[in-house]
Amino acid sequence: MQETILTNARIVTPDAVIEGTLTLRDGRIATIDEDRSALPGAIDCEGDLLIPGLVDVHTDNLERQVLPRSNARWPGVSAYLSHDAQCIAAGVTTVLDALCLGDLGFDTERNQTFVDGVRDLDQLAGAGVLKAEHYLHLRCEIPALDMPAALDGVAENPRVVMASLMDHSPGIGQYRDLTRYRAMRIRQTRMTDAEVETRIGELLERRERLRRPQREWMLQRLAHRNLPLASHDDDTEATIAENLADGIRISEFPVTMVAARAARAGGMEVIAGAPNIVRGGSHSGNVNAADLIEAELIDAFASDYVPASMLEAAWGLAARDTLSIPEAIALVTDRPARMARFADRGHLAPGLRADVVRLKPFGALPVLRGVWVAGARAG
């Protein structure tokens, strides 16, 4: 029997913060008691908070480990282990690695990251060397010529637990400002203004031709899996209406208040990027997530590109009394767990998986002091 007793703690339950003792036994939460344990093996948490392990339904962080510089690809397994360590250091115990399927002509390295990422996860998870529990979130670039072949090769992988429909074409969604898009591509590439303009024209022609048939093919290809499906970077009411008609029930990173309100009105769940909260706004000029919080339009946060942003965003909202501690923590634990259909984690209750994070508040910042994954110390 493996047992860990965490006492003299403030335990964050779905409804309250209680002082007491949390007992982990054989990978599960055994008991939550409102008193202090006198057992000699109990760990004194010194009044620190205990919260559920975070559930990140969308992180691109692996891409940043694989390509620490634009022209320097890092070995895949090493990059994955580094990514895993960063997730644990951020209190993220369940990770949906969001790998991009399909190239729209400016991000050719992403295809290799996808292929290597699926292979490396299968290898590493089977070896038992990862600290967090990792799954796959397929980010399907709908107008990309190579998206169907990439999806077909991974559609049956049991680690796939979520998929999103993306369209990063110029002038669409996140990139609806074409002037900003042109400037970004010229800055990021060695292409001339004329070459970028030519590429934009090619991409728009391809989108007109392929978007709808490839969208329908993707939905049909994954229908038997009954996965949670998300739309990505929604910007208009018309976009939301199309998604609802296609059976999509999650709006991931809506870029306008109009889209977020339409998503909520249609019964969709809304994911926002935690970095938007931490930074005080969108890095690409889209809607401020703080405004979405104020309008009660956010159901969950995802880290997007910085694992540490999830807990920092949630704790910041609690520290500023925007939300109660249980409400704020639920945005990065229970709510995303439900979205991804994990019934065994996301909040602290007897019988659930013992994914637990110990943290000490430092003003508006949370300092992690311990992480347990399925009852085993991981950080």
Image: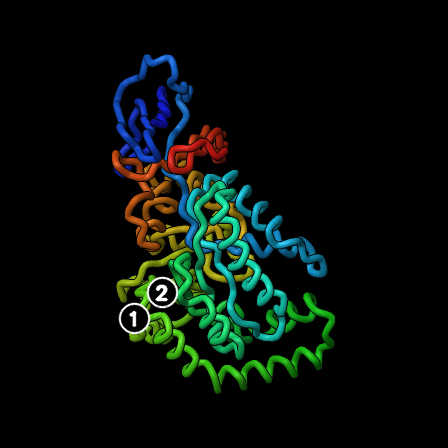
Q: Residue 117: horizontal and vertical position, in percent?
A: 54, 58
Secondary structure of the residue carrying tag 2 is: strand
Secondary structure of the residue carrying tag 1 is: loop
Q: Residue at x 32, y 71 (%)?
A: 223
- For disc 2, the neighbor class at 10 Å (few under 14, some 14 to 19, many from 20) is many
Residue positioned most to the front: 127
When asked about the image quadrant of residue 313, the answer is top left
From what the image shows, is residue 282 above or below residue 78?
below
Residue 229 numbered tag:
2
Tell me: 156 left or right of 131.
left
Tell me: 172 left or right of 163.
right
When asked about the image quadrant of residue 322, the answer is top left
Q: Residue at x 40, y 74 (%)?
A: 218
- For disc 1, the neighbor class at 10 Å (few under 14, some 14 to 19, many from 20) is few
Q: Residue at x 48, y 29 (%)?
A: 369
Location of the N terminus by quadrant is top left
Colouring used for the render: rainbow
Counting residues from the start of the chain, the first of labels 1 and 2 encountered is: 2
Visible in this render: residue 289? no
Q: Nearer the viewer, residue 112 or 194?
A: 112
Circle 1 is placed at which residue position?
247
Q: Nearer the viewer, residue 299 or 30?
A: 30
Kind of residue at disc 1: Gly
